[in-house]
Image: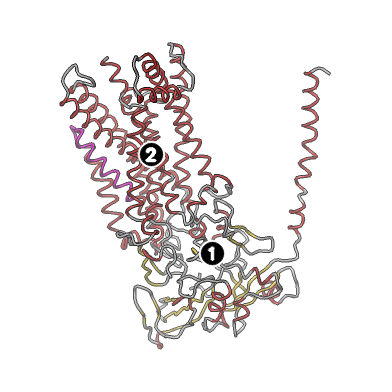
């Protein structure tokens, strides 16, 4: 009879009999996804709060993408629970000495802030669309439904006078301003969940929340940069197919110019946050070696021997050094920035992996080790939820949600207006 | 009475009443009772008496409905072998439910290790179980309060409320917790709480043929466990975590943690 975690755990040397890798791939995905949410929001706030005007185009994109990522942040948690149907208890009967109990409050606060900000950003669009649909003669079924939806989305606020829109702008800045600390809290507390486990020598450090926030911003910016580039490439391809003057036509040169500009500037911010993240991670590593507490022998065996390839090759070299050089190299191109972002995303994923799985790679006895074998072939519910199918579900959902969201809050709205 | 006057007097009344009301809160009857309970369980393990027969593990698995073949247990016994060069070997084959029947050490994937008897400086057994800490990290981190500390000591898990997040399992420095293979919720040693409240000893204490395990009430000054804890030279496991373990050990060696 297998207990949870036994199927993918190999023990070596002396390990307590009850120890297994109980936090598997979904717990790697969890901080990864929340990190992307927080990072995307911080990127959008660079424009909304700090007034980095050049980021206007990507900021709107990042905001909507952050909202699409949000519901996905709790999916891995649900998938890893042994009793997923009781998951709602975290919201209903939170036990506040637990870091996880804060999830419901932080998560819903954050969701409210992002939703409110998006509403203010798109209110004018909702009103205009609903009005246009209302005035449209001979409407079909779909138009009527759309009119109903957009009218509902206005929440009854139909005033789009200059003064009203000014107020909207003020509200956006306020929401984005409140949003930054809340986004940092959302992810910082994910770091706290790990950092406060005193039983785990690798996790326990007050630096953990800060490290998590920095790497979150890095991964969020990298993903926005990558998806933004992909979407812009698609738009360029569309622009090539359409004739000037036809419906939805956009000037190819214009798109290329905007893309180039936005990507290059975003890449600069990406580098700044990468420096901060790597500095903190290395500080943590050096400090552990220097202080050499009781656990250090076990930790050193994991970091420098057993997981050395994952830590130093996959995480630091491919995930940090290589993309950093790519971004730093003169005459950066959109393509190079996008490829560097892929490496950065991979690096942050490996960092999460090395923290979550690496933290369970040694036994609390400090005499033995545990190795995690990813279940490539799902053979039961456990390996289905915490194997390929579960991971793919978590990874694909934000893009589906983004596609649907984009139907109601189009991220490239501003440029269309200009052309009209 | 004017509305303004009414509000003014209302504020005065509420502010004035707040002070005595808070005093009422301070004298919560539950706290008063807890300050002087007549029960406080403690466990005493005499490692010098343990021979590693595994009867305690057998009894525990049977009493507490932990599947015989599942590779988890609420209690287990560890074997330590220290060589003359100072190398420490330890093992715990099948949680020691069948006892230690082979001189080979079971090092899991590293295989069976043979230590030359002439090289051995010392060897001994250490029974382990939940320490029912006074500052339990497992109860602290449970996000839904499904695991809680009873007034008389033991920490319990509500099987109907546990969501199975595994946070408590991660937070226990002693490896005392695991997922129950049938109920799919966190499980742990309760010092047979159900038996204690019927005036019985725990299953492992009853099964130990050598008296290596004892349970007693710290509030009873004549209890042998209380006497041993008060005047004996005893140790606890991993005291540096600040968990305040309530399982006390006689003859703990520095290799054990």
* Total count of labels: 2
Task: For residue A96, say whether it is visible.
Answer: no
Range shown magenta? A328-350
Task: For residue A74, say whether it is visible.
Answer: yes
B208 sits to left or right of B22:
left
Q: Is residue B223 magenta?
A: no
Please tell me which residue is depicted at 54% across the width and 72% down the height of the picture: B75
Q: Is residue A243 above or below residue A85?
A: above
Instruction: Provide residue B34's location: percent of width, then percent of height.
Output: 73, 58
Question: What residue does disc 2 label?
Answer: A69
Instruction: Provide residue B56's location: percent of width, then percent of height.
Output: 56, 79
Colour option used: secondary structure
Q: Is residue B63 above or below residue A266?
A: below
Identify the element where label 1 is drawn: strand
B40 sits to left or right of B135:
right
Foreground residue among A33 and A362: A33
Foreground residue among B53 and A298: B53
Identify the element where label 2 is drawn: helix
Foreground residue among B185 and A333: B185
Question: What residue does disc 1 label?
Answer: B187
Please tell me which residue is depicted at 34% across the width and 73% down the height of the picture: B109
Instruction: Provide residue A114's location: percent of width, then percent of height.
Output: 44, 31
Residue A407 falls in image quadrant: top left
Residue A153 falls in image quadrant: top left
Please tell me which residue is depicted at 24% across the width and 35% down the height of the picture: A230
Instruction: Provide residue A178's location: percent of width, then percent of height.
Output: 48, 30
Q: Residue furthest right?
A: B1
């Amino acid at each position: 009879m297998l207990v949870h975690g036994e199927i993918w755990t190999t023990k070596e040397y002396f390990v307590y009999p009850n120890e297994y890798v109980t936090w598997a791939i979904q717990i790697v995905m969890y901080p990864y996804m929340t990190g992307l949410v927080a990072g995307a929001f911080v990127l959008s706030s660079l424009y909304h709060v700090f007034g980095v005007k050049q980021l206007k185009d990507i900021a709107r994109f990042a905001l909507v993408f952050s909202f699409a990522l949000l519901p996905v942040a709790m999916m891995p948690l649900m998938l890893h629970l042994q009793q997923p149907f009781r998951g709602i208890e975290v919201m209903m009967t939170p036990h506040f000495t637990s870091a996880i109990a804060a999830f419901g409050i932080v998560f819903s606060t954050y969701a409210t802030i992002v939703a409110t900000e998006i509403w203010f950003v798109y209110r004018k669009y909702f009103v205009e669309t609903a009005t246009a649909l209302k005035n449209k003669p001979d409407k079909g079924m779909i138009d009527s439904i759309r009119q109903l939806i957009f009218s509902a989305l206005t929440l009854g606020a139909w005033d789009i006078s200059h003064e009203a829109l000014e107020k909207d702008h003020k509200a956006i800045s306020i929401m984005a301003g409140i949003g930054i600390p809340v986004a940092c809290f959302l992810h910082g507390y994910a770091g706290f969940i790990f950092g406060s486990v005193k039983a785990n020598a690798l996790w326990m450090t007050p630096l953990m929340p800060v490290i998590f926030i920095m790497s979150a911003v890095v991964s969020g910016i990298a993903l926005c940069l990558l998806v933004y580039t992909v979407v812009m490439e698609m738009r360029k391809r569309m622009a090539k197919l359409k004739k000037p003057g036809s419906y939805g036509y956009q000037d190819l040169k214009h798109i290329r110019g905007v893309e180039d500009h936005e990507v290059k500037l975003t890449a600069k911010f990406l580098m700044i946050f990468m420096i901060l993240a790597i500095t903190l991670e290395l500080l943590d590593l050096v400090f552990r070696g220097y202080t050499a507490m009781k656990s250090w022998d076990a930790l050193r065996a994991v970091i420098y021997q057993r997981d050395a390839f994952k830590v130093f090759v996959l995480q630091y070299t491919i995930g940090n050094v290589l993309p950093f050089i790519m971004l730093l190299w003169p005459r950066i191109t959109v393509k190079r920035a996008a490829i560097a972002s892929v490496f950065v995303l991979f690096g942050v994923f490996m960092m999460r992996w090395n923290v979550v799985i690496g933290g369970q790679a040694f036994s609390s006895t400090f005499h033995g080790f545990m190795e995690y074998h990813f279940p490539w072939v799902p053979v039961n519910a456990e390996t289905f939820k915490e194997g390929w199918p579960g991971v793919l579900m978590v990874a694909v959902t934000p893009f589906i949600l983004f596609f649907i969201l984009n139907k109601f809050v189009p991220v490239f709205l501003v440029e269309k207006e200009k052309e009209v | 009475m004017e509305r303004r006057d009414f509000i003014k007097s209302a504020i005065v009344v509420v502010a004035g009443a707040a002070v005595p009301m808070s005093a009422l809160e301070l004298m919560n009857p539950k706290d008063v009772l807890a300050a002087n309970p007549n029960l406080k369980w403690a466990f005493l393990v005499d490692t010098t008496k343990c021979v590693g027969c595994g009867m305690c593990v057998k009894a525990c698995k049977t009493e507490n409905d932990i599947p015989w073949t599942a590779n988890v247990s609420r209690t287990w016994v560890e074997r330590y072998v220290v060589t003359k060069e100072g190398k420490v070997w330890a093992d715990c084959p099948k949680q020691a439910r069948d006892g230690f029947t082979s001189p080979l050490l079971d090092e899991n994937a590293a295989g069976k290790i043979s230590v030359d008897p002439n090289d051995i400086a010392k060897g001994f057994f250490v029974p382990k179980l939940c320490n029912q800490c006074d500052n339990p990290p497992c109860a602290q981190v449970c996000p839904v309060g499904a695991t809680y500390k009873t007034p008389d000591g033991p920490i319990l898990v509500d099987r109907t409320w546990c969501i199975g997040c595994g946070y408590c399992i991660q937070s226990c420095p002693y490896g005392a917790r695991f997922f129950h293979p049938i109920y799919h919720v966190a499980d742990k040693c309760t010092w047979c709480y159900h038996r204690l409240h019927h005036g019985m000893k725990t299953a492992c204490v009853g099964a130990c043929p050598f008296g290596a395990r004892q349970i007693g009430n710290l509030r009873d000054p004549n209890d042998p466990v209380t006497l041993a804890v008060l005047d004996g030279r005893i140790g606890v496991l991993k005291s540096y975590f600040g968990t305040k373990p309530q399982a006390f050990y006689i003859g703990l060696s520095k290799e054990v943690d």
